[in-house]
Amino acid sequence: MSYRDLAAAARGQIGPHCRACPVCDGRACAGVIPGPGDKGTGRVAGRNWEAWQALRVNMDTLHGSFLADTRATVLGRTLSLPVLVGPVGDVQRHYGEKYDTASYNRCVLEAAAGEGTLALTGDGLDASIMSEACALIGELDGRGIPTVKPWDARTLDGKLEEALAARPAAVAMDIDAAGLPFLRGQEPPAGAKSPAEISEVAARCHEAGVPFVLKGVMTASAAERAAEAGVDAIVVSNHGGRVLDGTPATAEVLPSIAAAVGGDVEVLVDGGVRSGLDVFRALALGARACLVCRPFVVAAFGGGADGVRSYLDELRCELTDVMEMCGAATTADVTPEMIWAAPAAR
Ligand SMILES: Cc1cc2nc3c(=O)[nH]c(=O)nc-3n(C[C@H](O)[C@H](O)[C@H](O)COP(=O)(O)O)c2cc1C
């Protein structure tokens, strides 16, 4: 089933906040929280998507014939494609009754592992969200990445213990989560974290032999502080616009961040990546891999685990096509020169 068909099948089952649009471009749900929308004027999710569409790719088929190899090495593992399923916390609240967070996590974790990649799981005020996610990842021999929120020290300590006990592929933290409207002034509290605090979290993960990923980095300066603190990977992310209105698109900041820290840490990106062509664009701007989040919820509502697998396969086929049409035999061969640069105005 194509993503369009999955979205059509999801309509009527998902909602009322998500419209399961044929292209998840952030328009229909702009500003809708609770729901999958973004904060304030609700423009950032749409901006993320548009920024990828504005990038034109350089077609070049003057090369020997090859079958493009979409595999990518991410956090020490070879993934079948440079796409991970992004984390969603509190699925029922934002998308409706069909899935609770545990059943959604099971669906995407198993489907992603079956397709040779990984899903991240989310976190929330309800402690069972994280506990159930970690139990599932443990059942899957660690093939998943729990994402913990930047809680106060005591809460964080307990959550890290749970996460590391699952022996996951990595542990992530969405350091930007304190900006979520429904997390403000709540118990347990969440907030910004200093480089020293992040360094402690990274060290604790490393002691357990688990890589640590910092999600929610939007400047080269913050990326440099993250690298100095010892993180293994960052996710260039504005949380799909859910934590702060008025930010640039992730595609706009990715090149400067990749230039600053790409040699030191793995640079991942999310926000509005919807097609294999968008994945190619992200690789060309310096990302090692992408997270795709909202469309996988739609794929799961429309087709369950088969829907998630179909969408991953669609992304893989589209990426293969673009790589072959632009002359990249492997994901490592995708370079910035494959993005068209308009001649400077005279
Ligand atoms: C309903 C919803 C819940 C989310 N929950 C989490 C979460 O628990 N942890 C997290 O790191 N990101 C969370 N995110 C952010 C996504 O993982 C991702 O960064 C963002 O949606 C941008 O990617 P996308 O445009 O592909 O959706 C959530 C996003 C949505 C829409």
Image (tube, rainbow, N blue to C red):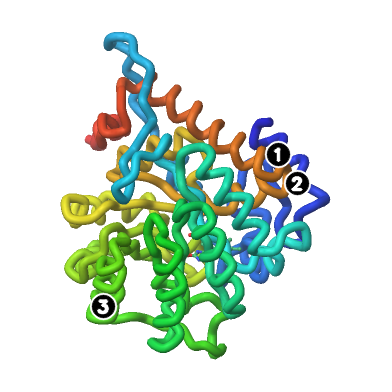
Q: Where's residue 172, x and y in %?
A: 39, 64
Dot 3 lies on which element?
helix
Give, as a three-letter code, the residue at label 3: Glu
Q: Where's residue 68, x and y in %?
A: 37, 22
Dot 1 lies on which element?
helix
Q: Which residue is mark 2?
A: 10
Q: Which residue is mark 3?
A: 200
Residue 149 shows which numbered tag? none
Q: Residue placed at 32% from the left, 63% from the top? A: 212
Is label 2's Cβ within 8 Å of ligand 1? no
Q: Which residue is mark 1?
A: 6
Q: As drawn, is 289 to the left or to the right of 88? A: left
Location of residue 263 with respect to 309 vertically, above or below: below
Total marks shown come to: 3
Location of residue 53 with respect to 228 vertically, above or below: above
Give, as a three-letter code, the residue at label 2: Ala
Give, as a three-letter code, the residue at label 1: Leu
Q: Residue placed at 30% from the left, 60% from the top? A: 211
Comparing 110 with 70, the one in front is 110
Q: Residue placed at 26% from the left, 33% from the top? A: 332
Q: Earlier in the sequence, mark 1 or mark 3?
A: 1
Location of residue 45 with respect to 5 vertically, above or below: below
Give the crowd class for mark 3: few <14, some 14-19, many >=20 residues within 10 Å. Answer: few
Dot 2 lies on which element?
helix
Residue 340 visible here: no
